[in-house]
Amino acid sequence: MNNHYRNFVIGLIGFTGLLLAVHYYIFYNFFSEIELYLPLWGIYAFNAVLVFIVYSVINYKVSQGSDKAYQIFLTATIVKMVLSIVFLLPIFLGKSDNKQVEVINFFIPYFLFLVFEIMGLNKFFQNQETK
């Protein structure tokens, strides 16, 4: 495991933990009367695992000499969007009384994780160009 990959994984764990703690604090101090169908930890685990998989696949492909990292990223992002819809399907099918809150609780972390992933990949690609 190279140093950059290890730093990304440690950063992802720290980012996930910090973001989850802030989200728990805000939600349970200000919106504790709302019953959630999807637990916050499940949302964060889903997003963190997807970011880890995408980064790992791109890291592996680039280390094998592939020059299609950008196409892999775009394909993986589309797959992540589809998986997100599947993940939220119970909400859309009426399992929750608070659909809007559930969707907001999912997509704010989703986009924050996407920003984290893009920043990590950007740093990774810059390191690859200097080698």
Image: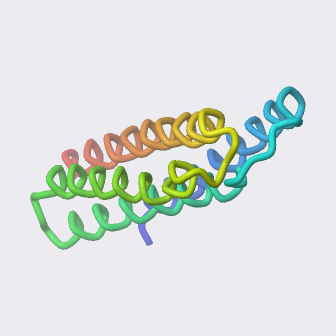
- Above-or-below relation of 79 to 103: below
Residue shown at 29% from the left, 47% from the top? 127
- Direction from residue 3 to residue 41 in the image, left or right: right
Is 67 positioned to the left or the right of 60 in the image? left
- Relative to the observer, which residue lies in front, 38 or 10? 38
Quadrant of the snapshot with the N terminus: bottom left
Quadrant in the picture for residue 5: bottom left
Q: Residue furthest front?
A: 94
- Residue 116 lies, in percent from the top left, at 47, 40
In x, y percent, where is residue 47? 52, 54
**Pick the front one: 131 or 35:** 35
Which quadrant would residue 51 be assigned to in this image? bottom left
Residue 32 in sight from this viewpoint: yes
Q: Nearer the viewer, residue 77 or 65?
A: 77
Q: How many marks?
A: 0
Color scheme of the displayed model: rainbow
Position of residue 62 measured from the top left corner of the image (x, y, whole percent): 21, 63
> Residue at point 31% right, 41% down?
122
Q: Is residue 126 above or below residue 66?
A: above
Task: Give the x, y percent position of residue 33.
Answer: 88, 35
Vertically, is 20 above or below 2?
Answer: above
Of all residues shown, which one is farthest toward the left?
67
Name the residue located 27 percent from the left edge and 51 percent from the top edge. Answer: 78
Say left or right for 70 vs 51.
left
Q: In this orientation, does residue 4 appear?
A: no
